[in-house]
Amino acid sequence: MLCRLYQSVVTILGFLVLLGTMSCSDLNTGNGLDIGDQEYDLAVPLINTKISVKRLSDVSKSNTSIKIAPDGKATVLYNGEVIRRTVSAIFPPFPGLIPYEITDSVSSVVLQFNQPYQLKKATFQDTKIRFFASTDETEDVDVEMRILELSKDGKQFVTNFKLKYQGTSPTNVLTDEILIDGYTLISNSNTLTFSYKAITKSGKRIKFKRAQMSFDVIKFSYLDGYLGFHRFAVDGSVIDVGLFNNWLSGSFDFSDPKITISVDNAFGLPVRSRVNKMDLTSINGKAVSLQSPFVNTGIDFAYPSFSEIGQIKKTNFVFDKNNSNIREVFNEKTKSIAYDIDALVNPDQDTSIRGFIDGSAFFVVNVAVEVPLLGSINQVVIADTLDLDLKDVNEIISAQFKALISNDFPAQVDVQGYFLDENGKNLEQLFDNAGITLRPAALGANDRAIPGIQEVFNITYDEQRFAKIKAAKKIAFVVKINTTGSDTNRALWIYDNYGIGLKLGSIFKYKKQ
Amino acid sequence: MWFKAVTTTKFYLMVTLVLSIVSAGYGQDISLAQMSGFIQGTYLNPSAKIDKKLNIGLGSYFLSLETDGPSVNSLLPLGANGKRYLADTDHGFTLGGSQNIFITNDIHTLDLSLKVGGITIMAGHAFKTKCNIIYPTDLVSLLQRGNAPYIGKTLNIAPEINLNSYNELYLGLQKSFGPLDIGVKAKLLFGVANIFTDRSKLDFTTDSEYYQLRFDGDYVVRSSALVKYQGLDDIDFDYQGFSFDNLFYNNRGFGLDIGATYHINEKLSIAASALDLGSITWDFFPRKFTIDGQYSFDGIDVIDLAIDSNLSIQDTLLDLLNVDQSIQKYSTRLNSTFTFSASFKPSDKWLINGMVVYQNLNNASRSFMTLAVMRNLGPVSIGIHETLTTHDYFNIGLSGRIKLGPVAVFAFIDNVPAIFKPLDNNFISGRLSANLQF
C-alpha cells in the first residue's frame, strides 16, 4: 500500500514532466534528459477516500459481509459454509445386485432396499432392467412379459422377446437392457408382479424352467410413501469472527448478536435439526457452549405438502439473547464459532407419515453469525501491525503531510502509530505527541449521528525524522475507540452512511540520489 | 522510475531541437539583399533586379536556429553523467511569460530566370520547413522546482508547436516601370508535414486544500502526416510522411510573393516586399487532437486500491487528460514576412544595405533591423552586418561572395561568436548558394 502511494508520488512527478513534453513514447526508455541535482518540492494528493459502512457493504464479497436494513442500520454477517443436499442423500442409487426370481407365469417379488421404505408411488429414472429365461422346449418360444404395477402414460409395462432353439437344450435367453425411465411403480407393498405368456412355435403355452428379472441400478425421480429414517451430518464447520481480533483492552457490548440457521427445503419430509455442538471460542482460547432449549430439542424445518410439490419451504431459526446465552458469550470477544449439526429425516420414525421426494429436490442449510451493530464500545484499544518497506523512498528527504479527516461515527477515535525496526524497537512515532483524536460525530434525532466535521491535521517529517523511519520494517497502529455514552452502556446503532473521510496530501522534498 | 519519464526517445527529439537552438536567421535576409543581381536576391524581394539574360540557381541551403529564451547551456546544462538536465536557474523568467524557438530550413533546389524583352520570367522549386515552438515560463519553472512552490497558483503549461513543411513550385515575373521595379511570384504549394497548435490553453493548478492536481484545458493540436497519438506516454512522429513524396499531390496550397523597388537615384534605392502570403489546406491524414474541459486528480481511493490489485496510478494519471482524436481537414497560413529596405551603393567597391523585417508566425511574431556593408574586391566580395532585435543588440555576421566568370558562390554566417560557442548563444544561421549567370 505504502509502496503504491510512493509510486504515485514518483509517477506524478513523471507525469508533470510528461505534460511538459507531451511527447513521451516509452516511460522506460533510458536516454535523453536527466533530472537535475536540485531539490524538487512535489505537492501530491495521495488519498481521497470515504470509507463508509455502505461502501464496505457494497464491496464485501467474502464470508464476512455487511447487511443494511431499509432504515440504514448495519449488521455484520459471518457466513459459514452453505450445505446443500439432494435426493441422493435420502435415496441414493441402489445397485441391482440380486436378480429377482420369476417363479410362475404370474408371480410377485418384493423390492429389497437397505432402508425400510414403504413406497406408494415411485417413478424410475435412468434405470434399466433385463430378463433371463430358460426352457427345455425343442422349438422356438415367443414371450410377452408384463409388470403389472409398472406403467407409463397409462400403459402397463410390456416387452416381448424370443427364445430361439439352436438344436440343443436347454434354450436360454438374456434380453437386452430395457430402459424404464419414466415408468411409475404404484404399490402399497414395494411389490412387482410379473405376468408372462410363453408360446412355442407349435402354439403350446409353456412355463419357463427358470426366469429372472434384474435391475442395473434402482434410481427414482420421484418417490412417495414412508421413506425411512435418515440422519446425516450437515457437517461441522468453524465460522471465524474477526470483530475482536485486534482487541487489546476495553469492553464491547453488542446488544443482540445472533446465530441464524436458515434452511431452504424442497423435500416433502419432516426434517429436524440436531445441534451436536455450538461452541463459541473467545480470543483468549476459552470455549463456551451455546446454551438454549432448542439445542436440546432440535429445530423442525418446514417442508412442502403434497399440494406444494416443487416448492421450497424456508425456515429461519435464530439463537438470540431471548432463547440462548449468546449475548453474554459473544461479548466475551468471540473469535470463532464451531458447530456440528445433524439433520434427521422422519425423526420420529412414524411410518404412517407419507412424504415425498422430487428428483430435483434439495435442501440447503446456512449457518451464520449476525451481529447487528447496535451496542457500545467502552475505551476499547485495538492494535495492528503492518509490514513496511521504505527502501525505495530513498530519494525523498522530507515530507509534510496534510490530512483532512471527518468522522461520522458517534465515537471518539484516538490514533497513534509507531515505526518499528525488525526487532520491534520503536524508531519514531507516526503522529506528534499523543497522536490524533477524531472527535465523535454529534448525535441527532433517534440517536443517529449527524455527519462529522472535517478536521485538518498537519504532520511534518523533517529530514532528520524522515531518515529515522526509512529503517522501519513495520508500522504498528494503536487505536482507541469510545462510543458516546459507553460508560452507561448506551447502545447506539451504526448506520450505513457513517464513515471516515480521509483526504491526504503531502509535500515531498525530492532529490536525486 | 519517474526520471525515466523524462528520458524518452520522443522527448529527446524535442529536446534535441532545443539543444540545437542557437540562432535565428536575422542576417539571412540582409544576405539576400547583398546578393542583388542574382536570382537568390528575389527570395527576399521578387522585384530585386536580376542581372544577365539567363540565371540558374544551382541550389541554396539555408538553416536558421534561434531562441529568444536562454541558450542551451544555460537552460539545459550538462550533468556529470553526460546527460543534460533542466537546471534550477532563474533566467530572469517571470510567471506567465513564454519563450520562442524558431527553426527555418530552406532548400532551393533549382531556380531559373530568363529575361525576355523587358520582362524577366522566374521559376523554381524549394523545400521549406519553418518551425516555431513556444514554451511557457510556467512550465519550465514547474519542471525546475516541482509544483509545491506554486500551490494555489494557476500555471500555463501548454507548449505550442507550429511546424510547416512544404514543397514550393513558383513562377514569377519582373518588370520595370521607369525607376520602379515590380516583381511577383505565384507559388503552388504541396504540404509535406504539419503540426499546428490551434488552441493552447492548458492550465495547471495545485489546489491548496490537500494538493489536488487540477487541469483546465482548451488545447487543440492539428497534424498532418507527422504525429500519431496513442496516449500521453505514446506519441509517435511518423517521419515517413516527411518526404518529397507529396510533391505533386495532397495538402495543396497557394502562395504569393510581391515586391517593389524604387530607385531614387543611381546610388540609392528603397524596396518593400511581402513574402509567403497564402495558405495550405491539409487533407492528408489531418488529425485533430483536443483536450477540452477540466480534469482533476484528487488522490487514490483506498477502497478501490484494496479491491483492485491491478489499479495503476500511472494509468490513472495518463488517462486523466482525455485527449480526443478526430480526422478533420484544416488550413494553415504561411509564415508571412514583410520587409522594408534601403540600399546605398556609393561606388562599385561598396554596397550598404539597411532593412527592417517583420515576420508573422503562427501565434507569434518577431521583428528586427539589420545594417550591412559589403566591399567588392574584384572576384571576391566580403561583408559584415549587425542585427538589432528586441532582445539582442549585438549580432555580428559575415558574408562573402566569389564570382568567377558565370559562376558565383555565396556564403553567409550570422552571429559569428556563436560559431565557437554555439551552445552558449541563442542564435546562429548560415546560407550557402551557387549560381550561374549568362
Image: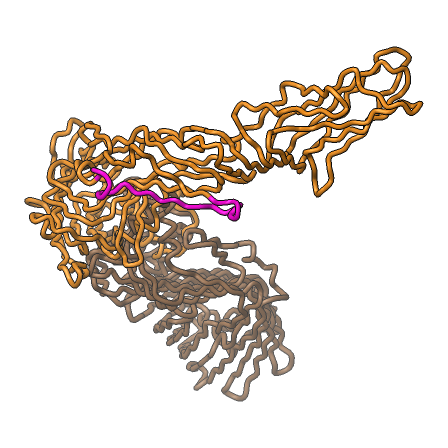
Which part of the image, by quadrant, shows the C terminus of chain A?
Answer: top left
In the rendered image of this protein, does residue A190 appear above or below residue B205?
A: above
**Residue A423 location (% of width, % of height):** 16, 26
Tell me, what colour scheme is on the image?
Answer: by chain
Q: Is residue A322 left or right of residue A482?
A: right
Q: Is residue B412 visible?
A: no
Q: Is residue A182 magenta?
A: no
**Residue A191 location (% of width, % of height):** 64, 28
What colour is chain B? brown
Q: Residue at (11%, 54%) from the top-left corner?
A: A439
Q: What's the magenta region?
A: A304-326
Q: Is residue A371 left or right of residue B340?
A: left
In the rendered image of this protein, does residue B145 appear above or below residue A325?
A: below
Residue furthest toward the bottom?
B178
What colour is chain A? orange
Q: How many marks?
A: 0
Residue closest to the eye, B52 or A433: A433
Which part of the image, by quadrant, shows the N terminus of chain A?
Answer: top left
Q: Is residue A309 magenta?
A: yes
Q: Is residue A66 visible?
A: yes
In the rendered image of this protein, does residue B274 appear above or below residue B320?
A: below
Residue closest to the eye, A190 or B74: A190
Residue closest to the eye, A50 or B236: A50
**Which quadrant would residue A386 be assigned to in this image?**
top left
**Residue A95 location (% of width, % of height):** 60, 23
